[in-house]
Amino acid sequence: MKTIKIIVPIYGLGWILNNIKLDNNIEIRFINELKKESELLKKSGFNWVKYKCLLDIKYFYNPQRVDEPYPALRFLLDEIQAALRIFNSGFVGFSGVISQPRVQPFPLLIDPSIPSGPPFYKIDKNKLSKFSEFYQKFKLAYKKKKVAFDWFNKSYLEVPVNKVIDYCICLESLFVPSNSYEKKKFILQGLKLLNFSPQKLDKIGILYDYRNALIHADYQKSFKIIKQYKITKNFYDNCEIILREILRLYVEKPW
């Protein structure tokens, strides 16, 4: 086994009260200027001005495996990134990977899209200090419904039309039994059992009808839905809020 230190610049996350320890080998912390980490980011191809915090991982791996340290490391990063995005709204994520000592293929740029304006990951600092506790529950839920969490995570960087597909895959993973053709019915029934309001049920119903029109290339129906229900940014934002609420409920009490 080999051990390397992995540094992952976090975009969208501002100052934190204290380092956030996720386990014995992983923490979110400030950039260490005494160790010239801003200079390290710059040399590695990252715009160091954009970052306040890093994900710091003591990473163990078997060098004989062809998927180590990457892309196997990416699975861990996706899990933590999804947890951050479900914990709170706003634009947050991991830009790439730097290793110490340097091993291939690092430094590696994963996501170059750094926000220059809102929506930022605006979160109460006291709430953020509870992320470690949330992450422990999240890991258990993630193992059970990885597809649901991964597709919600993926939706963050999608164009609006693709978000429709991502959200519906997420919902199907949570609520629809295998080999069922009544997907919308199961999803809405599941939301009723979770005591979601009729207004939220309507939003998800429209989302699913729009998804069906897109999947089957029914452009006439798609345009009708867009016009009738005013499918704008506000609609997608509302759907994201509902999806996050559902996933947080699943984290607290998986069904």
Image (tube, rainbow, N blue to C red):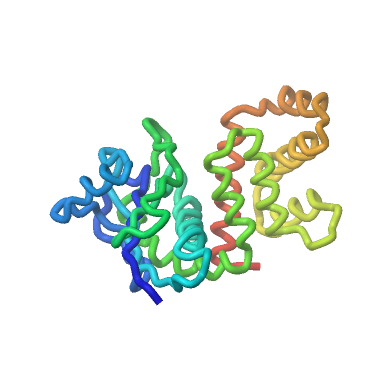
Taking the image as shown, residue 109 lies to the left or right of residue 30, namely right
Q: Quadrant of the C terminus?
A: bottom right
Residue, x 78% and y 24% (percent of image)? Answer: 224
* Picture coordinates of residue 64, whole percent (x, y): 48, 72
Q: Determine whether 27 is above or below 44 in the image.
A: below
The residue shown at (76%, 24%) is 223
Choose top left, top right, bottom left or bottom right for residue 140. Answer: bottom right
Residue placed at 76% from the left, 58% from the top?
176
Q: What residue do we see at 81% from left, 32% from top?
A: 217
Q: Taking 210 as reference, is 248 above or below it?
A: below
Furthest toward the left, the residue is 34
Residue 234, x across and y down, in percent: 57, 31
Residue 139 percent across, percent down from the top left: 51, 67
User: Which percent across, then down, holds residue 154?
Assistant: 57, 47
* Above or below 25: residue 110: above
Q: How many marks?
A: 0
Q: Of 119 and 143, which appears nearest the observer?
A: 143
Which residue is at the front of the view, 197 or 179?
179
Tell me if 216 is positioned left or right of 146 in this view: right
- Quick check: 43 left or right of 106? left
Q: Quadrant of residue 1?
A: bottom left
Q: Residue furthest bottom?
A: 1
